[in-house]
Image: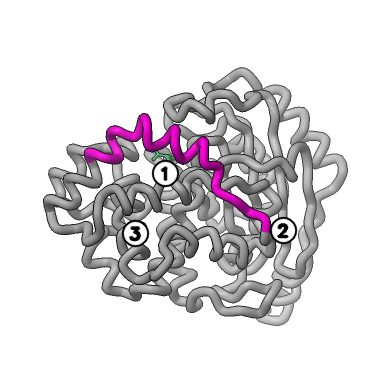
Amino acid sequence: MAVSSDQNIKSNIEITGKILSEISKLAEHGFGKGTVADYISSLGKVNPNQYGLAVVYRNGDIVEAGNSGTRFSIQSVSKLFTLTLAMRLVGPELWTRVHRNPSMDRFNSVSDLENNNGIPGNPFVNAGAIVVSDAIASRSAAPNRIVLDFMRTLSGQNDLYVDQQVALDEAETGHRNFALAYLLKDYGNISNKVDDVLSLYFRHCAIEMSCTELAQAALYLANDGVDPKSGQRIVSAEETRELNALLVTSGMYNSSGEFAFRVGLPAKSGVSGGILAIVPQRMAICVWSPELDTNGNSVVGQLILEYLTQKLGISVF
Ligand code: GLU
C-alpha cells in the first residue's frame, strides 16, 4: 500500500481541457455575484470580471487558465509568507504573542483584541499579522526589504515589487489597523514604532504577484517545507504541518469552517480576490477573481476550488 500511494503522490493528477472549459464557464456564471473591495481605493479600480488559475505541481509542471499571469495586489495572502518568515526568524517564541485559534470576529476587530488582553486570536487576523510584522522588524536590519526579497526568492521572480500607490492608499484609510497597532503597543505586544510596523505591514500587503507566481512561491507547503525548485529548506516538516493547520482553521476569514466543508484544503485568502490553496505532497493552486462574498472571499475563486477539488478528489479530508 505504501508503494502504490507513494506512486500516486508522485504522479500529476491530470487537469483536462474539458475541466478547464468547465472552469471558464463557472467563472462566467459567477461574475457579478460579489463586490470588489474598495476600502483601499486602488483595489476598487480593478476590472471585476476576470479570473486567473494556476496549478503548480511539485515536479514543476504548471496548468494555467484565464488571467493566470496578471499581477494583483496580494493583500492578506502575504500573511502566510510573513508568518513563515517570522517562524524562521523567531521560532516557537512567536506563539507567546499570538494565539492559534479561529476567530468568529471580523478580521480587523478591535474588540476581539481588547477581550484577549492584546494577544491576537491567530496570525491571519490583522492584529496577528501586525504582531508578525513587528517580530520580523525586530529581527531584520532591513525590514522593508526582507519580505519582498523572501517573495522574490520563493517565486523565482526578481522583478516583484510593492505597488507604492496601494501601500499609500492603505495607510490613508487604514484607521482600524492604526487602532489595532496602538492597542497592541499599549499591551506591550509591539516593540517597534507603530508607524514602522504598519509601514512594513502595508507594504507586504501591497506586493503585486500573479496566480502562477504565488503558486510557485507556496510550493514548499506542498513539499514538507522544502522548495522543490531550489531544493532549499524553507521551514521544517513539522512547521509545514503547523502552517497548513493554521490555514485550514483561520485562512479564509470567518468562513474557514464553511470552506473546509466545501473545499477542504489549507488556503489563504485576501481582499483583492486571491486564494492560495495547498494540496499537501502534491501541488499549490492559486485562483484570483476580484469580486468577494460577504466574508471577504473571492466568489469565483471559491467556485473554482470547489469544482476542482471535487472533480480531482484532492480535498485533504
Ligand atoms: N491590507 C489589508 C488590510 O489590512 C489586508 C486585508 C485582507 O486582505 O484581508 O485591511
Figure coloring: one colour
Q: Residue type at mark 3?
A: Val
Q: x, y (%) of residue 293?
A: 49, 27
Front tag of 2 and 3: 3
Q: Which residue is mark 3?
A: 132
Q: In terms of secondary structure, where does tag 1 sit?
A: helix
Horizontal arrangement in the rendering, residue 266 relative to residue 254 (left or right): right
Q: Residue furthest right?
A: 17
- Answer yes or no: is residue 130 visible: yes
Inter-mark Cα distance, 1 to 2 = 25 Å
Q: Residue furthest top?
A: 32
Sort mark 1 into few (<14), some (14-19) or many (20+) by Cα contacts within 10 Å.
Answer: some
Q: Determine which residue is flagged by label 1.
A: 257
Residue 210 or residue 282, whichever sits in front: 210
Residue beneath the point at 70% across and 29% down: 50
Q: Is residue 312 above or below residue 35?
A: below
304 falls in the magenta region:
no
Q: Is residue 175 above or below residue 153?
A: above
- Reading the chain from its start, which is encountered first: label 3 or label 1? 3
Residue ID for mark 2 = 56
Q: Earlier in the sequence, mark 1 or mark 2?
A: 2
Residue at the image position 17 percent from the left and 52 percent from the top: 185
Q: Are marks 1 and 2 in contact (CB under 8 Å)?
A: no
Q: What's under tag 2, amino acid-wise?
A: Val
Q: Nearer the viewer, residue 138 or 278?
A: 138
- Per the rendered image, the range of residues in magenta is 159-179
CB at mark 3 closer than 8 A to ligand 1? no
Q: Is residue 151 left or right of residue 216?
A: left
Q: Nearer the viewer, residue 233 or 173?
A: 173
